[in-house]
Every structure is written in C-alpha cells, then in structure tokens.
Amino acid sequence: MTHYETIIGLEVHAQLLTESKMFCGCSADYADAAPNTHVCPVCMALPGVLPVINRAAVEKTIMAGLALNCTIAEEAVFARKNYHYADLPKGYQISQYELPFCRDGWIEVEAKVEAEVEAEAEAKRVGITRAHLEEDTGKLVHAGAHSLVDLNRAGVPLLEIVTEPDLRSPEEAHAYLTRLQQILRYLGVSSADMERGAMRCEANVSVRPVGVGEFGTKVEVKNLNSFKAVRQSLEYEVARQIALLEAGERVVQVTMGWDEANGRTVVQRTKESSADYRYFPEPDLPPLVVERAWVDAIAARLPELPDAKAARFVAEMGLDPREVAVLVADRAVANYFEAVVSAVRNPVSSRNRVSKYAPKTVANWITGELFRLMNAAGVGIDAVQITPAAFAELLALVDAGTINVNSARRALDGMFESGRRASDLVAELGLAQVSDAEALAGVVAEVLNRYPAEVASYRDGNEKLFGWLMGQVMRATRGKGNPAVVRELLDRALNVQR
Ligand SMILES: [Zn+2]
C-alpha cells in the first residue's frame, strides 16, 4: 500500500472577552440571558443604523497577534462577507479580508514524532497565516417543526485564527488547539471554552502520497465543538480519503459536518470559494490606522506566556520540565504554585519558617495531593479555599516534625473541605506527631511481644519483615509516630536483643 501524508490546516474562532459587542453597546455576556434580550437596532440590523468599532476587541486582537508572533498591520480594513442565513440579520457579516490585523505568525507545539526508538516529544513550529476580527452570528434554536432565532450572540466579537497547512496528524492538530487555548487563556482575551462554544474549530484536511509535492484535494470539516470531535473527525476523514484513493477514486472538494453520534463526517454542501462571499470593504467603517505607539503599549502589557513561565520555573527553581508542564498548563495553577513558594520563603510568622522545603516539594504537594482533592471534588483551582499562606503553614508543620506526611495529608483534606487552618485541624484531630522516644519504645516493645513468630523469622534472616513490623508500630500509634524515631527504635530492639 502507498504511504500517505496527512495535511491539516485549522481555522479557530474564539469569542473575545469584551464587555460589549463588536459594533454596538449591547452586553457581550449573554450566556445566561433569556433569548433576544441582549439586542439593539445595530445588532438586529434595523435600517439606518451604523456600526462603531469596539476598541477593546481590537486591543485583544492585537494582543493575541503579538502572542502568536504575528506582524501587526499598520492599517486594517473591515470587509463585508455576504451570505444569507436565518441567524444573520444583515445578510452579511462584518469581517476582514485583504487587510487583517495580524498575519504571518507562528507558535510552537509539542508534537509527537515517530522516532526509531520510541515516540518522543519535540517542539514543532506551526505557521499562523492570519488572525482577524469579525462578528459572531445569531443562533437558531430548533424546536419541533419550528426554528427560533436568538440574536443575543449576533455581533459578539470573534477572533479568527487561521494556520498554514503545517499540521501532519490529528494528534498535532490536538496539540496545536491545546496550546492555542492555553495562550488565549493566559492573555485573558477569551475563555476559549470549546464545550461552551466560546472556541470553535474548522479543519481543512487532505492526504497525498509521501513524496508528492502538491497537496491533495482538501475537504473542510465544520462544527467541531470539542477536542474529542476534532481528533475523531480528523482520524475518520483521513482514513476515508485514503480508502477512496486506494480504490482508485478521487476526493471531491466539499464541506463536511461531523456527526458525533454516528462517528462519521457527512457532506453539508459543495465548497464555496471566497468569490461566493463577494467580499468588499465595509463602507460604513473607515480603514483603521494602527499606530505603532499603541501596539507598543499593548506589547508592554503582555503577560508572561506559558513557554517563558515554564523556562523560568526550570531555571530559577530547578524543577523537572515535565512537572513544570503540568504546573503551567493553567495560568491560575501556576500563579497559585508561585504564591505558595513565595509564602514558604517569606512566612507570616517565624514559627512557620521552613528549612528544607524547596519549590520541588511545593510542586509535588500541588500536583499530587491538591490535584487529587480537586479531581475528586470536580473543581478547578479557583474554587480552592486554601490560601497560599495556609498551605505554607502546613508544610512548615511537616518540616518542624510536628506532623508526619500522612497526618499532613489528612490535615490537607480538612483544609480543602472547610478552608480552616492546618494548626487548628492538627489540634482538633489530634494529628500531632509522637516523637517522644520513651513513649514510642513502649509501643515497639508491645508490638514485638504480640508477634513473636514474625520477630523470630526476621532474626532468622527474613529481612522483609522489618517493614511489616514497622507498619504494625505505626498503626499502633494511629499513624502519628515519627517514622524516623520508630525506625531507629525498632532497629535497635530487633538487632540488640538478638
Ligand atoms: Zn446591539
């Protein structure tokens, strides 16, 4: 069988987090609103109205363009994209065509490459053809024999980001979307929430025999509303196109939709070309001159992006890159981690001073214990009521030997549940560690008396029983024995009384 190469380009639409819509003063926050309550003559396209450009939407577009390494236009033009659909009251959408705000950018994604030995992650650069600003359409709600129109969404600012055909597999497409979502969230320009429709994706996909220079006929797959849908539809479409070519047939250029229930792509319509949209410059809006000073001011406000943050965590804190990837995936998690590290370094009281707790320990507690609790409760970091200072106090209690790690986990459970302080919970639950050698020696003697056969077996050379006996002593202290002290006492008792 011929080997085929997959060629994928993605178009992503992300709603911008502005207070008002793109060309009118209606609130863009329509998620929980009753239908047709966030509307006015402009976004309902009543006769005689004129659009006014939303400055915040343009700033967020430029901000995204800078983060995507794009060239920012000195002059941008809005254009009318003409088509007829029931959710588009004007009969055209104000978009951008020849002069978008941003072009010729790139981002790096982690791409799995097929290596000789094993699959390993490698950074791959994906070209961004353009990023432009347009308005969202309304929405049709199908109810029985009728379709209802809701114009709350009409005119919400939409950032469209188009890649070069640089992606070579559904996995790479998935990795690109993940990275793009992360960047948009770091910038705070979009919630980029696919499940809630704030980020939507279309893919252009084709295949060609390996070694052939020109692209195969591409198919556009629309309405991809989840990461899963993107991956599954691309896998399906690649297999479908290869099967056609193998059977000696040809791929027809069409627009497909993804039928999630049946796991297949279905033809929606034959592909329209840009000529069908009869683009022309929007006569109601003048070209927008983008002054360099404005772009520079926006660039100065760019937050630290995921790659830079990850590199800093590795360099400054000596963390493992894989661990860092987990911490920086979500900006709020990264901020929380840094706040705990800072609280550990600068404790509120001298009693909370920690001697040996390095950022690595903080990272382990957050990605291990805290994530476990968040997953179990199904909440994100925003819902965690443990303040960074309270987290630092817990680590200080472990460091001081007041509680052992097991007890610290129990205290953290309580802190997560109630937001109370570690020291209060330690006192209330009686979690304080027993380090008193005299008291612990008594427990050790008791355990050795209770299990004479195991003790004899250990002394005959069955060394594995040491751990078991250690476990019995710890259980007898209800987990509160200082493990180091217990180990030493047990060792002495077993090996001296020989
Ligand atoms: Zn409006």
Image (cartoon, helix red, strand yellow):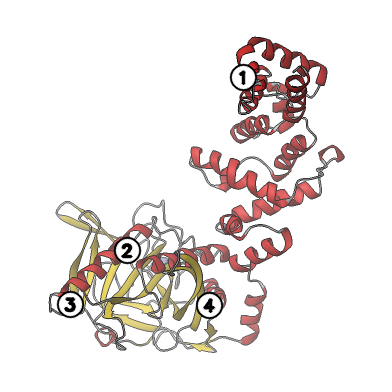
Q: Residues within 10 Å of mark 1 (few under 14, many from 20)?
A: few
- Mark 1 secondary-structure assignment: helix
Q: Amino acid at mark 3?
A: Leu
Q: Which mark is residue 457?
A: 1
- Rounded to the nearest angstrom, the CA distance separating label 1 from label 2 is 64 Å
- Total marks placed: 4
Mark 2 element type: strand
Towards the viewer: 90 or 480: 480
Q: Residue at x 49, y 66 (%)?
A: 121
Locate residue 99: give its quadrant: bottom left
Q: Earlier in the sequence, mark 1 or mark 4?
A: 4
Residue 358 seen in the figure: yes
Residue bearing mark 3: 245
Give the Cα separation between the discs numbered 1 and 4: 71 Å
Alpha carbon separation for disc pair 3 and 4: 38 Å
- Label located before the other in sequence (1 or 2): 2
Task: Find disc 4 in the rendering and name its residue.
Answer: 65
| Sequence-wise first label, 2 or 3 | 2
Q: Residue at x 65, y 81 (%)?
A: 296
Residue at the image position 50 percent from the left and 81 percent from the top? 105
The label shown at residue 224 is 2
Q: Which quarter of the figure is the N terminus placed in?
A: bottom left
Observer-nearest of 430 and 497: 497
Q: Among all residues in the image, which is located at the extreme front?
A: 460
Circle 3: element type: helix
Kindly report the distance in space between the C-alpha atoms of the residues bearing marks 3 and 1: 71 Å
Residue 112 vertical position relative to residue 47 in the rendered view, above or below: above
Q: CA distance from mark 2 to mark 4?
A: 23 Å
Q: Considering only order in the chain, which callout, 4 or 2, is on the residue closer to the N terminus?
A: 4
Ligand 1 found in image quarter: bottom left
Give the left or right position of residue 57, taking residue 406 as reference: left
